[in-house]
Image (cartoon, rainbow, N blue to C red):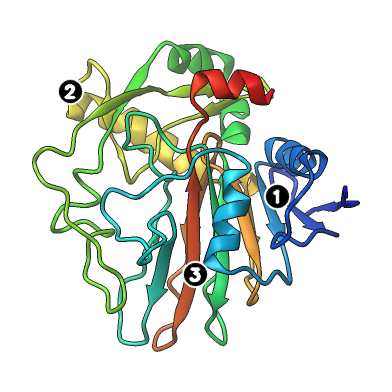
Amino acid sequence: MTERLNIRRVAGALGAEISGVDLSQALSDETVAAIRAALTQHQVIFFRDQDLTPAQQVAFGRRFGPLNIHPYVSGMAGQPEVMEIIKEPSDKINFGGGWHSDMSFLETPAIGSILYAVELPEWGGDTLFASQAAAFDALSPGLQATLEGLNAVHSASREYSAQGHSAQKRGSMKVAEADGYVGEYVHPMVLVHPETGRKALYVNPAFTLRIDGWKTRESKALLDYLFEHSRYEAFTCRFSWRPGSVAFWDNRSVWHFALNDYPGQRRHMRRVTVDPWPKAQAVAAE
């Protein structure tokens, strides 16, 4: 059965809310293709009033690619692809509380993340999203051409170090600190989306260390400018969660930021992260 999707844009730069589909069910290939098309067009898509078990969330995520097992955050017992993102009332620091693109610190970064709301604070806890495609489009042609010739070095070494935001101790999450063998990986500073052909900036404050071939000090001015530019309000949208809400964003062109504005309250989310298909399977899926 093919569901009739209703798609409503939520902001000018990115974001759309989709209704008319139950993600807990086995979806037709046509429905999955329509969701994928909405994701590539709108960069982040939202669903309301879903009721997903971890296994159902995994099954939905696998329709879009193999699922990632996070190298530093322990997954659920028996379901290692599912990351439980929990902030207890006693926790001061949240997970994901800074602008970033998931998993850019890997040799093969993730293409998408699917976040499901289990338990939410009475107020606060929204997530911000920023279109890096819109950020690239707004640059001058000269700077665009310059950036297209550059690569940047990404690593988990800073964010998951002992002092890093992501590695801080939390009551209900097991997060490991990155050791000396974490690795550095080089990615283009401008990604061309494989499905739309649209160009997007691909650097972020959490995981981008420097421009490849440049010293850290030389890189700082340009990267700081891009980091400031890329979170300009006109490039963003904001999602207010309810229990059962789902957000699915494209890490190739979107930053996100989980707001930590609900002290003394509990927030419980579940995330699966989608990796690219191996090349042979990607061709078959097209």
**Which of the image's four quarters has the C terminus?**
top right
Q: Name the residue under label 1.
A: 15
Q: Residue at x 35, y 61 (%)?
A: 75
**Mark 2 / mark 3, whichever is N-terminal:** 2
Q: In this view, does 1 lie to the left or right of 53?
A: right
Q: Which residue lies furthest to the right in this view?
A: 4
Tag 2 secondary structure = loop
- Residue 81 is situated, as x and y percent measured from the top left of the image, at 42, 54
Q: What residue type is labelled 2?
A: Lys
| Residue 40: mark | none
Judge left or right: residue 208 versus residue 5.
left
Q: How far is the residue under mark 1 from the one under mark 3?
A: 20 Å
Q: Is mark 3 on a helix, strand or loop?
A: strand
Q: Is mark 1 on a helix, strand or loop?
A: loop
Q: Residue 91's spot in the image, x, y percent?
A: 30, 80
Question: Is residue 195 something that shows in the picture?
Answer: no
Residue ID for mark 3: 269
Crowding around mark 3 (Cα neighbors within 10 Å: few <14, some 14 to 19, many 20+) is some
Q: In which quarter of the image is residue 254?
A: top right
